[in-house]
């Protein structure tokens, strides 16, 4: 089976969030279970020059909007499997990956260019695996091409939703300029008088998936559907939930080169060293008996930072430490900075994006806070499990699928989870966790249960393979 995966970001070439982790890891995991795929992603200014490149295609002609664009495609295997990076400076050489008024145009171009590239590579793929709104444009073109171009006749599409909150909306008058002038195409995009690339991907793709089972159900409700729940309910029989894996080559305390001491299930002593070094690196006194609460997050309302704001006083009044790493909305950045200024002996804060520090915090912390309002999958709670850092989460999306509340009678469960999105419910779980933290034996039990979980990509890749097979066997 031939599979092409399209993604607007992919580790290690570019990253703003979980989508990049998935796009970077899935091809490698598919390869391990015997399925070869190619990954296609843009070549950003931030990507260029970082890896070993070879120019695979110097003249990738893309006919678009009445022009012939000449793009290039670089080839790399830096993520362990074949990747083509589309180089078109006009669209991708910017100060950041997203955040421009014309983002919809940039990714419409990416979608077109990716389809041109696939054609240049040879035999048609059985599956084009599309990810998030950036690739909704390709979904629409493929749904059309299969009827008019024999090359695409047997190609099927799988469209994965990583975060429904970002929908690639734009003025519907722009559609014809992007080359979507047919009635079928316009109808696919149209939504409430606007055009939405996410909605288009949802309504035209052969199969749909999202990054956890629970999120696949949640997005069919008005509460979590961001206005698209109706279309998802219509296509519920084609919508599947596959929890992301995590890359144990990168996130593994036994081998992680970024942490001060390695540790394993049978010997957690290295974790104490990590804790001590973490406290030192933030200039905090090393009272190793006190628990370290941690947060690593984009600072947006999605992540439930307001709940952390509401309970931080209570956490600190128990004498615990809080260490936060994140960047985003100014009110949350302000909150963290002010909390640190107010309690400099208990709070450590780093505003910004720092991959290395993320590893050090996962290793050195005791408790990980993830009270997201909604969470399609979430990765940090899974990293936490592997690093024996006990997560406290809101029971939504992937957090609900991967975290099981600790049960002190049967000794089952790998963390703590609260159902109602309130500070009181969150605080109750924080106190419960603190209670167990002081019972060394039980605490180790929770840590061990977490470390034993298998959230590997191989598991997830097998489920994607099933999905591809199902799509392949399907008539459009
Ligand atoms: P989302 O994709 O919604 O941001 P996920 O939990 O799925 O959330 O993935 C977030 C990824 O980004 C994780 O790998 C996390 O460690 C990383 N991350 C988020 N913020 C930072 C930061 N400030 N510094 C380093 N890594 C971060």
Image (cartoon, grey):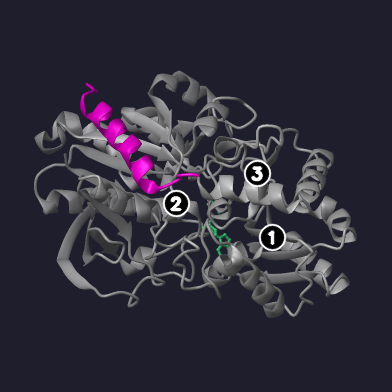
- Mark-to-mark CA distance, 1 and 2: 19 Å
* Residue 181 seen anywhere in this rendered image of the structure: no
Which residue lies at the image location 19% right of the left edge and 54% below the top edge? 117
- Residue 381 position in % (x across, y down): 58, 49
Residue 59 relative to residue 64: left or right = left
Mark seen at residue 294: 1
Q: Do labels 1 and 2 touch, CB within 8 Å?
A: no
Disc 3 packing (10 Å; few <14; some 14–19; many ≥20): many
Disc 2 packing (10 Å; few <14; some 14–19; many ≥20): many
Q: Which residue is mark 2?
A: 246
Classify 210 as above or below 217: below
Magenta stretch holds residue 439: no
As drawn, which residue projects farthest toward the right?
A: 317
User: Which span of residues is magenta-colored?
Assistant: 453-476
Residue 87 relative to residue 293: left or right = left
Which residue lies at the image location 16% right of the left edge and 36% below the top edge? 152
Q: Which residue is mark 3?
A: 415
Magenta stretch holds residue 469: yes
Classify 286 as above or below 173: below
| Ligand number 1: quarter of image | bottom right
In front: 310, or 412? 412
N-terminal of the pair, mark 3 or mark 1, is 1
In front: 150, or 277? 277
- Mark-to-mark CA distance, 3 and 1: 14 Å
Q: Name the element at disc 3.
A: loop
Disc 1 packing (10 Å; few <14; some 14–19; many ≥20): many
């Amino acid at each position: 089976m031939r599979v092409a995966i399209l993604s607007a970001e992919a580790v290690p070439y570019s990253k703003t969030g979980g989508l990049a982790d998935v796009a970077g890891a899935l091809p490698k995991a598919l390869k391990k279970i015997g399925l070869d795929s190619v990954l296609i992603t843009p070549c950003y200014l931030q990507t260029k020059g970082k890896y070993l490149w070879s120019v695979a295609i110097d003249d990738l002609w893309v006919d678009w909007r009445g022009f012939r664009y000449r793009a290039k495609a670089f080839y790399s295997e830096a993520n362990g499997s074949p990747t083509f990076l589309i180089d078109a400076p006009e669209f991708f050489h910017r100060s950041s990956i997203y955040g421009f008024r014309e983002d919809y145009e940039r990714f419409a171009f990416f979608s077109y260019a990716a389809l041109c590239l696939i054609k240049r590579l040879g035999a048609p793929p059985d599956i084009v695996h599309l990810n998030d709104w950036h690739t909704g444009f390709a979904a629409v073109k493929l749904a059309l091409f299969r009827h008019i171009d024999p090359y695409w006749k047997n190609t099927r599409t799988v469209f994965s939703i990583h975060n429904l909150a970002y929908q690639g909306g734009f003025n519907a008058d722009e559609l014809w300029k992007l080359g979507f002038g047919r009635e079928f195409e316009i109808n696919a995009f149209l939504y409430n008088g606007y055009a939405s690339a996410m909605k288009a991907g949802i309504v035209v793709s052969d199969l749909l998936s999202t990054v956890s089972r629970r999120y696949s159900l949640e997005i069919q409700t008005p509460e979590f559907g961001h206005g698209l729940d109706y279309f998802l309910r219509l296509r519920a029989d084609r919508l599947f939930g596959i929890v992301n894996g995590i890359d144990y080559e990168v996130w593994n305390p036994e081998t992680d080169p970024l942490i001060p001491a390695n540790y394993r299930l049978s010997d957690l002593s290295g974790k104490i060293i990590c804790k001590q070094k973490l406290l030192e690196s933030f200039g905090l006194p090393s009272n190793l008996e006190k628990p370290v609460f941690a947060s690593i997050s984009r600072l947006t309302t999605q992540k439930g930072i307001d709940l952390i704001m509401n309970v931080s006083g209570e956490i600190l009044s128990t004498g615990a430490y809080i260490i936060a790493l994140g960047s985003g909305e100014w009110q949350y950045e302000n909150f963290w900075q002010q909390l640190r200024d107010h309690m400099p002996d208990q709070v450590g804060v780093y505003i910004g994006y720092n991959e290395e520090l993320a590893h050090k915090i996962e290793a050195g912390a005791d408790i990980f806070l993830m009270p997201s309002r909604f969470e399609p999958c979430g990765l940090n709670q899974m990293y936490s499990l592997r690093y024996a850092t006990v997560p406290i989460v809101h029971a939504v999306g992937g957090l609900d699928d991967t975290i099981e509340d600790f049960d002190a009678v049967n000794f089952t469960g790998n963390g703590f989870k609260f159902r109602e999105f309130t500070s009181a419910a969150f605080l109750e779980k924080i106190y419960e966790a603190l209670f167990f933290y002081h019972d060394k034996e039980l605490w180790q039990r929770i840590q061990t249960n977490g470390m034993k979980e298998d959230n590997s990509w191989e598991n997830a890749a097998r489920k994607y393979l099933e999905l591809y097979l199902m799509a392949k066997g399907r008539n459009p």
